[in-house]
């Protein structure tokens, strides 16, 4: 029976993985800490590590796994910006879950937008205290407004469909437009100038790091809404905070935050948080921060568990690794997967 070390395990992870572990005949050891150079020793004796979005998979972790004869990491997520792929090449195979429920994330993006616009978070608190006043709760019709979607992959396209369902006009920016999609592509600059709502659905890369910054914020319409369900570092948080203080930005819905690793997924209600930008953002009535939860639906969790274990089964069976990725795959797609359909 293959042994798996499962890092950053939460109760809901166990629920969905335990349902399937017998089917795949894996022994899963759940660890609460994230995978890092301090915790990698816990995997000793395992055949694989399962990791998540905020684990710090740097060269020290890769080398330690390799020395422990663990040659595969299964990411139970789509994103992989937290891995040193160069260090992993020819040592540790990296598998991921490319798609689980784009609907879950796109629907959460719309939930943030609707909440911010119609102020239901404020109404909820008011009516619980028998305050039935409507002051400060005015929203606007989404119908007829322009949504600017950055990144038209799986999630971006779901979000576009949802926006169109609300009667919104949609413009989009993506350096790799989807041919014949009927999407109205514009430059990022035009998108900034024309959108009433901007929603980010692109990966975090060196090109997209701080794509929303002081300069691009200045281009945006006054009273724009910004929604980020992708990766925190797409936005320069200090610049966003300043734009909110300057009343340039009407509202921001953030499911991700650039320094989230230290905080998100943990109950820190008894702790003093030393990140002033995060605390200030959370304190704003027109900002909603959720804790990287956009993926958290029954359908997505089921699919994540199934694909992660299916990926590991394929690895141990010596089969083709459909969901493997390496630094060559990322570099202009130059990986030809010629090693028995594996990256190396
Ligand atoms: P995807 O790979 O299907 O689509 C990404 C799109 O971004 C592609 O069309 C790509 O061409 C485009 N893109 C690449 N570089 C770009 C750039 N410089 N500017 C604009 N667009 C660019 O990915 P997806 O499944 O739609 O996921 C999108 C992102 O959502 C992921 O990268 C991940 O960071 C995030 N995500 C978040 C959650 C969550 O729970 N909050 C869950 C899953 C995914």
Image (cartoon, rainbow, N blue to C red):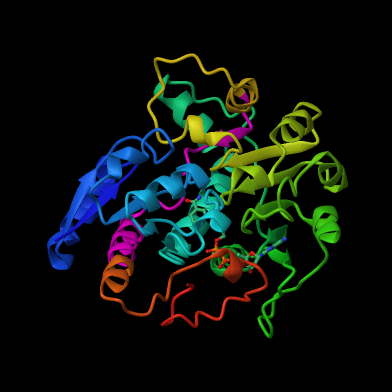
**Whether residue 293 can be seen here:** no
Relative side of 72 to 187, left or right: left
Q: Position of residue 255 (x, y in %)?
A: 53, 43
Q: Nearer the viewer, residue 122 or 311?
A: 311
Relative side of 18 to 315, left or right: left
Q: Quadrant of ligand 1?
A: bottom right
Question: How many callouts does the rendering have?
Answer: 0
Q: Give me the residue at 55% from left, 45% from top.
A: 112
Q: Give me the residue at 71% from left, 53% from top.
A: 206
Q: Position of residue 158 (x, y in %)?
A: 54, 67
Q: Give me the residue at 53% from left, 35% from top.
A: 260
Measured along the vertical axis of the image, is residue 298 above or below residue 281? below
* Residue 278 sits inside the magenta stretch: no
Q: Nearer the viewer, residue 44 or 341?
A: 44
Write the start and end of the magenta stretch as one range: 284-309
Q: Position of residue 148 (x, y in %)?
A: 72, 59
């Amino acid at each position: 029976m293959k042994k798996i070390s499962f890092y950053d395990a939460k109760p809901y992870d166990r629920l969905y993985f335990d349902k399937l572990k017998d089917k795949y005949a894996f022994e899963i050891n759940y660890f609460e800490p994230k995978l890092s150079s301090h915790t990698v020793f816990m995997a000793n004796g395992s055949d694989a590590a399962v990791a998540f979005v905020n684990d710090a998979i740097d060269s020290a972790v890769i080398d330690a796994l390799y020395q422990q004869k663990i040659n595969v990491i299964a990411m139970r997520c789509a994103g992989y910006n937290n891995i040193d792929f160069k260090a992993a090449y020819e040592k540790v195979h990296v598998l991921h879950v490319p798609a689980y429920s784009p609907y879950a994330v796109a629907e959460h993006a719309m939930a943030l937008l609707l909440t911010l616009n119609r102020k239901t978070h404020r109404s909820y608190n008011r009516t619980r205290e028998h305050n039935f006043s409507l002051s400060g709760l005015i929203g606007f019709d989404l119908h007829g407004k322009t949504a600017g979607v950055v990144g038209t992959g799986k999630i971006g396209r779901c979000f576009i469909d949802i926006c169109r369902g609300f009667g919104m006009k949609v413009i989009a920016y993506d350096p790799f437009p989807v041919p014949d999609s009927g999407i109205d592509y514009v430059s990022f600059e035009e998108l900034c100038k024309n959108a009433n709502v901007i929603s980010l659905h692109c990966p975090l890369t060196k090109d997209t790091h701080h794509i929303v910054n002081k300069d691009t914020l200045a281009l945006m319409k006054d009273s724009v809404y910004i929604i980020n369900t992708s990766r925190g570092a797409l936005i320069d948080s200090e610049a966003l905070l300043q734009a909110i203080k300057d009343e340039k930005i009407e509202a921001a819905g953030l499911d991700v935050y650039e320094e989230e690793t230290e905080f998100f997924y943990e109950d820190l209600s008894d702790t003093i948080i030393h990140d002033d930008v995060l605390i200030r953002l959370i304190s704003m009535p027109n900002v909603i921060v959720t804790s990287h939860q956009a993926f958290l639906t029954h359908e997505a969790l089921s699919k994540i568990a199934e694909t992660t274990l299916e990926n590991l089964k394929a690895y141990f069976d010596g089969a083709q690794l459909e969901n493997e990725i390496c630094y060559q795959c990322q570099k202009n797609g130059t990986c030809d997967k010629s090693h028995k359909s594996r990256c190396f």
